[in-house]
């Protein structure tokens, strides 16, 4: 079964704007997948629907075969989301932000702490564990959200513009981290408006513009045709 199935997904925002016009896509387990498109294309809307922060108008979304309308809690166990906006409590310490997220998933405290340490170390934030969120740089905040999204060890990690506003050096180290995570078996989907980023990381790609998928192929095939 695919990691993610989207069938005929439409979104009409209040006011009538059609952000998604019946998109369909499938992402296989183990893939590193890019949803590429310009600003306003509908990428964040798609991510928002997958994690139930945005309601959909019609269509179907399933995560490892579990329909999010039927069993969202079940689907959620398999997903880690790294949203574009910093949405953690800025006054909480980095370690607490990650440990508390584990609590939402019912992970017992000892294991939560172990996992938080593991991912904060991997993301180069262990030294900052007692620093409150607001004191971290933009790149550190982004990495903190990645650690938080991984604490329940989801099979599918979805990142919305993970390197937006991140400097070149930090971008490379995030790319290395994500590559390694994917090689270890985590399916990854990211949205980006940089073709370069999709090219550096991803195997398969869908291009979205004006709420429609205009390409859905391997990155290699796409580059050959460009
Ligand atoms: P992307 O992530 O690709 O930049 P978005 O999914 O954020 O695109 O937005 C797609 C379109 O939907 C944009 O034109 C945006 O202005 C519009 N949009 C996003 N959120 C809302 C909202 N809450 N109400 C109305 N329109 C919205
Ligand atoms: P719950 O419903 O379990 O209480 P929420 O949906 O309130 O959890 O999420 C708490 C915070 O964590 C919110 O800011 C939300 O955006 C974020 N969040 C929710 N699910 C995930 C996830 N799978 N990965 C990363 N962050 C998430």
Image: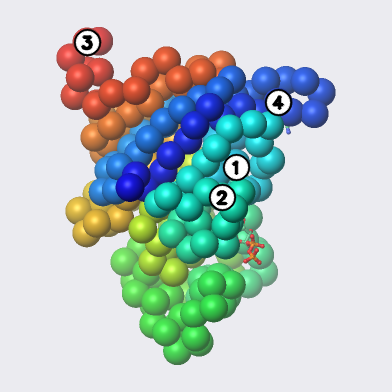
Which numbered disc flags the more N-terminal residue, 4 or 1?
4
Which numbered disc flags the more N-terminal residue, 4 or 3?
4
Which numbered disc flags the more N-terminal residue, 1 or 2?
1
Q: Secondary structure at mark 4?
A: strand
Q: Write down the residue under mark 2.
A: 68
Q: Residue at x 46, y 28 (%)?
A: 24
Q: Nearer the viewer, residue 146 or 29?
A: 29
Q: Write down the residue under mark 4.
A: 12
Q: Residue at x 39, y 82 (%)?
A: 114
Marks 4 & 1, CB-CB < 8 Å contact: no
Where is the C terminus found, in terms of image quarters? top left
Q: Write down the residue under mark 1.
A: 48
Badge 1 residue CB within 8 Å of ligand 1: yes
Q: Return the x and y of residue 101 as percentages of the image width and height.
A: 55, 70
Q: Quadrant of residue 221?
A: top left
Badge 2 residue CB within 8 Å of ligand 2: no
Q: Secondary structure at mark 1?
A: helix
Which numbered disc flags the more N-terminal residue, 2 or 4?
4
């Amino acid at each position: 079964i695919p990691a993610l199935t989207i069938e005929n997904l439409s979104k009409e925002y209040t006011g009538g704007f059609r952000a998604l016009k019946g998109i369909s896509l499938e992402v296989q387990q183990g893939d590193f997948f890019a949803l590429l498109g310009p600003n306003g294309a509908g990428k964040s809307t798609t991510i928002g629907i997958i994690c139930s922060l945005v309601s959909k108008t019609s269509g179907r979304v399933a995560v490892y075969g579990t329909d999010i309308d039927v069993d969202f809690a079940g689907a959620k166990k398999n997903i880690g989301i790294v949203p574009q906006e910093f949405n953690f409590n800025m006054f909480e310490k980095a370690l607490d932000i990650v440990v508390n997220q584990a609590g939402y998933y019912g992970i017992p405290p000892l294991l939560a702490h172990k996992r938080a340490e593991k991912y904060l170390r991997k993301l180069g934030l262990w030294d900052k564990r007692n620093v409150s969120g607001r004191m971290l740089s933009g790149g550190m905040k982004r990495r903190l959200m990645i650690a938080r999204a991984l604490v329940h060890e989801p099979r599918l990690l979805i990142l919305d513009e993970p390197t937006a506003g991140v400097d070149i050096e930090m971008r490379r180290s995030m790319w290395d981290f994500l590559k390694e995570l994917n090689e270890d078996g985590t399916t990854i989907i990211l949205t980006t408006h940089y073709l370069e980023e999709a090219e550096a990381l991803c195997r398969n790609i869908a291009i979205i513009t004006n709420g429609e998928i205009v390409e859905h192929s391997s990155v290699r095939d796409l580059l050959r045709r460009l």
